[in-house]
Structure formats: C-alpha cells, structure tokens
Image (cartoon, rainbow, N blue to C red):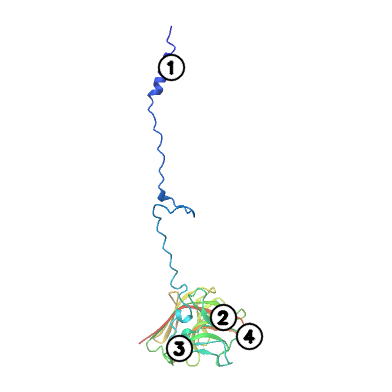
C-alpha cells in the first residue's frame, strides 16, 4: 500500500526550507527634523534652525525725507509757479536745502524729486508759461559760462510723468542764456526732442516716449557745440555756441488757459539724480 503521507511531508519540508525574511525595522524620526509650534508644548530639546536674516530695503527706498536729501541743491535756486503776477516766488539758499511743497516734493517711495507746474500758474515777466524749475548758481552768484571754453556737463536720470491735455508739452531740461533758452529737452505729445533756435529747429531723440518712463540724459556743451546722449546713445549734436549760459532742470509747463488747458492741468517731471560739472 503506498505511503499517502509522503507528499505532505515533502511539501512541509520545502516550506520550512525557505529562508525567513526579516521584518523591516521601524523608521527612526529625528526629532530635530520636525519643528512643531504648539503653544502649550515644552521647548524642544534640540536647537531650532537659525532665523533667516531680514532683507534690508534698497538704499533709495525711504532714505530721503525731503528733496534736498536726494539731490545736491547747493548750487541751485528754485522758481515756483506761485506768487505775484510776473514775479513768481523763488526759494534761494540755504532755504532750498530743506524746502518742500506741493510744487517740489518727493515721490511716495522717496526715490525721486517731483516738480509740478499747473497751466494756470504764475509766470516770469518774459514767459507765458509757468514752471517749477531749478536755475544753476555759482555760489552766491548766478552761473554764467560759455561752451567756447572748457567742458560743461549735465547728467540726470529723469522722467516726464504728466502733461496738460490740450497742449501736452513740457520742458524738462534747458540750457539758457541771459535772454532766452538756447536748447531744451522737451516733450511734445509723445515725441521727445532736443529743441533749439527758439523752437524753429529740433532733433527727435525718442519718437514714442511713454509718460513716466525714466531715461538717462547727458548733455555736454563744449567746443562750440552741444551734444545730447539719451540712454547712453548719442542722439543729437547741435552746432551752437554762446556765453552767459546756465542749466535749468524741472517742470516748465508749455501751456496755459489761453491754450485751452484748465488752470489746474499739471505738467510734472520727476528727477531721480542730477549732477553738473565744469572743467577747464
């Protein structure tokens, strides 16, 4: 009679011959790798990771409390669009260093100086248009130089931010002489130009300027000519020489109510940086 239990014995032996698989050890959690913030919990027994250092704001942010903190105003005086007709108020040294008003103030972030002149503002006796504008000085004397001698340089980062709607024109920078402007950096609509010859001639330096766009301006007056650089590129050369010249920078609004603009319509220029240099 065959042994009926033999196959069972063989199967049992095969199962018993399979090597045992060790159970995985439980994972160990490093208590320092998990940070729980629980009000009632005891302080952790391991040190917390160091706090990230605070990121300091840019130097220009909030670094100025008034225009004189941002721009070197030591060799300028300011003409305002207010005061008696034909004789607008001016702010001289040393008052200008601490002066601020709605016509001459900082941008909200403190990075630029805002010049504002309404179309209905007071004008000088020789102009029909109002201004909030710096005029170059040489100590206590009014500056007066010639581009036939030495090198005279202005560098500025600026933006034209508002123009009157009926006659959308604002001058942001000028060379002037004893009687009239020699040249202007001027916005007419959306065309930014270097204008000269009493407005009869001009060179376009930006045909499609967008209000509020900052640009870097450099003007060099030397060797009987005026060279204009716009955003680092030479944009205009004006063959013109003279004497009793000086710089003017700010908002010279080229409109008034007679031109169809509301008296409160504003021309506005923001100046972020300004430097002038005269060398022999």
Q: Earlier in the sequence, mark 4 or mark 2?
A: 4
Q: N-terminal of the two: label 4 or label 1?
A: 1
Q: Earlier in the sequence, mark 2 or mark 3?
A: 3
- Tell me how far mark 4 sits from mark 1, CA to CA: 115 Å
Q: Quadrant of the C terminus?
A: bottom left
Q: Secondary structure at mark 3?
A: loop
Residue 130 percent coordinates (x, y) = 56, 86
Q: Is residue 30 left or right of residue 120?
A: left
Name the residue that disc number 3 marks.
Answer: 94
Q: Residue at x 43, y 13 (%)?
A: 5
Horizontal and vertical percent position of residue 25: 40, 38
Residue 114 seen in this snapshot: no
Q: CA distance from mark 4 to mark 2?
A: 13 Å
* Label of residue 267 in the image: 2
Image coordinates for residue 211, horizontal then vertical, percent: 54, 74
Foreground: disc 4 or disc 3: 3
Question: So how many labels did they put on this image?
Answer: 4
Image position, residue 11 (x, y; %)? 42, 19
* Image quadrant where one finds the N terminus: top left
- Secondary structure under tag 4 reads helix
Mark 4 touching mark 1, by CB under 8 A? no
Q: Residues within 10 Å of mark 1 (few under 14, many from 20)?
A: few
Residue 151 visible, this orientation: yes
Residue designated by label 1: 8
Nearest to the observer: residue 44 or residue 217: 44
């Amino acid at each position: 009679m065959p042994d009926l239990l033999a196959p069972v014995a063989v199967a049992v032996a095969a199962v018993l011959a399979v090597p045992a698989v060790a159970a995985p050890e439980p994972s160990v959690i490093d208590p320092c790798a998990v940070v729980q913030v629980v009000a009632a919990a005891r302080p952790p027994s391991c040190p917390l990771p160091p706090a990230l250092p605070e990121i300091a704001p840019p130097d220009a942010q909030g670094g100025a409390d008034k225009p004189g903190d941002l721009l070197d105003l030591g060799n300028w005086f300011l003409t305002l669009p207010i005061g008696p007709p034909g004789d607008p108020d001016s702010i001289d040294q040393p008052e200008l260093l601490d002066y601020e008003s709605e016509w001459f103030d900082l941008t909200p972030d403190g990075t630029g100086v805002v010049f504002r002149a309404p179309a209905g503002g007071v004008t000088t006796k020789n102009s029909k248009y109002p201004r909030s504008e710096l005029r170059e000085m040489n100590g206590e004397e009014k500056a007066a130089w010639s581009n036939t001698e030495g090198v005279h340089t202005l560098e500025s980062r600026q933006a034209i931010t508002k123009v009157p709607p009926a006659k959308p024109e604002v001058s942001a920078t000028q060379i002037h002489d004893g009687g009239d402007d020699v040249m202007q950096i001027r916005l007419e609509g959306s065309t930014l130009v270097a204008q000269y010859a009493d407005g009869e001639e001009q060179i376009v330096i930006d045909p499609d300027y967008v209000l509020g766009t900052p640009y870097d301006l450099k003007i060099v007056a030397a060797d009987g000519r005026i060279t204009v650089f716009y955003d680092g590129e030479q944009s205009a050369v004006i063959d013109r020489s003279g004497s009793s010249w000086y710089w003017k920078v700010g908002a010279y609004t080229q409109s008034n109510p007679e031109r169809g603009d509301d008296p409160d319509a504003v021309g506005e220029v923001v100046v972020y940086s300004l430097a002038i240099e005269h060398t022999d």
